[in-house]
Image (cartoon, rainbow, N blue to C red):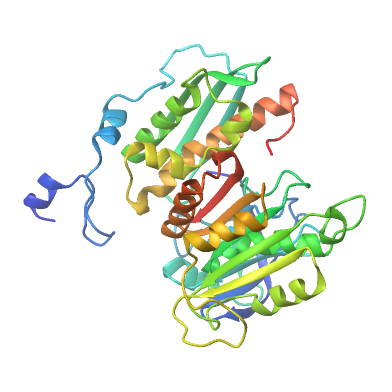
Amino acid sequence: MEALTPFKVLTKFPEAERVTTLLFIPNASALPSFTPGQFVNVYLPEVSAEGKSYTIASTPDDPHLAISVKATGKFSRALSALNKWDSALLSEPHGFFYPTDETTPRIFIAGGIGIMPFMSILRSASRARPGRNPGFEHMGLRIMFLYSNRSEAEAPFLAELDQLAAAYNAFSVRYFFTRASKTARKAALRRITHTDLKETAADVPGCHWFVSGSIPFVRDMRIALRALDIGEDRIFTESFF
Amino acid sequence: MNTRQTERFDVAGDACGTAWAYSAIVKDHFFSPRNVLRDGEDFPADGTGVVGSPACGDMMLVAIKVDKKTERITDIRWRTFGCASAIASTSMMSVMATESGGMTLNRAERLKPEEIIERLGGLPDRKFHCSVLGHEALREAVCSYRKTHGGAHAI
């Protein structure tokens, strides 16, 4: 059994349909250090002996540790239902889904709640300090984000992404809504296709591709990228299960 | 689950999803796993990774030997307390890591569960986390090696 630290809920708020963000603070220890893109394993002993992995949505500079939960099953519903000062056990941060190179352009592809690793990465980039943690203003590299959801109502963080795209020339976002007939923002009302990836590859040559989402989503995106002769060494994946 | 279902499928259908028949490759790697760290075997590793799965309680240890000049994985051993999918996945991972002269550490850091599952001929989605175990343990083993021997992260 891994080492676990007790945390309490500081506050919670809705992000989108069935998606709740919870801010946690440790009971009696310092916040763990982590790299944006990593996750923690969350345990609710009164609900299940098994833990579930949740990507950290906050940045290393935040005074809390945030996770955003989509209520799809027994555990996630119980986690979403926690109230202020309720407890949970959290592991140390884990995972390797983050850029390790500050000069290569990046394409982020997220399906639904798969956006979570990217929110920590993008938030860190937008709050960067020169000389310490290069961000949008200082990296000089491009980040393009392809974000697919069923509908605007179900898609968390749309307003925040719009703000980032408006604030930073280096960052651009394309929305895809698969079950919407009309949307308030400019979007493609369909799934991400092979053609979208091909055009993106041509637009941002030599980039690293980061894909996060459900197992079938990530599998399909990787197959499509490999069909475009994108090497495995340029593809990073994080499947949510 | 009826007898006819058990005769045709390896993974039960019931409430967990559709029933699944393991590929011949998965069965081969389960019944004849490669590169297992046997009891009493001496394997002085250059890097070791141990991970556990919060989803099922399985544990995985991966140990690697590395050619320090070429930074290629020359040998690997693993041991798990886990299911058939975890055993088959990590056995396949160990083959992928050491075939054709061995993966470079940079390449090993880019090895993905999806690649392992593809080589196995597929696994049911609810067994995906089993491939993650071996992949994460390999990543931890590479990290362990880099911490003691230096070297940059993969790009």
Q: Give residue A17's position: percent from left, percent from top.
A: 53, 81
User: Can residue A178 be spotted in the picture?
Assistant: yes
**Image quarter hosting the N terminus of chain B:** bottom left
A237, A14: nearer the viewer: A237
- Name the side, left or right, on which A141 lies relative to B99: right
Q: Give residue A4's position: percent from left, percent from top.
A: 61, 50
Is B61 located above or below residue B43 in the figure?
below
A23, A200: nearer the viewer: A200
User: Can residue A90 be spotted in the picture?
Assistant: no
> For the point 49% across and 68% down, which residue is it?
A76
Is A239 located above or below residue B34 in the figure?
below
Q: Give residue B137's position: percent from left, percent from top.
A: 54, 35
Which residue occupies the extreme right position in the image?
A131
**Image quarter hosting the C terminus of chain B:** top right
Quadrant position of residue A106: bottom right
B76, A45: nearer the viewer: B76
Q: Give residue A241's position: percent from left, percent from top.
A: 45, 57
> For the point 72% across and 64% down, which residue is it?
A58
> For the point 62% across and 55% down, which residue is it?
A202
Which residue occupies the extreme left position in the image?
B4
Is A101 located above or below residue A90 in the figure?
above
Is A24 located above or below residue B22 in the figure?
below
Labels in figure, total: 0
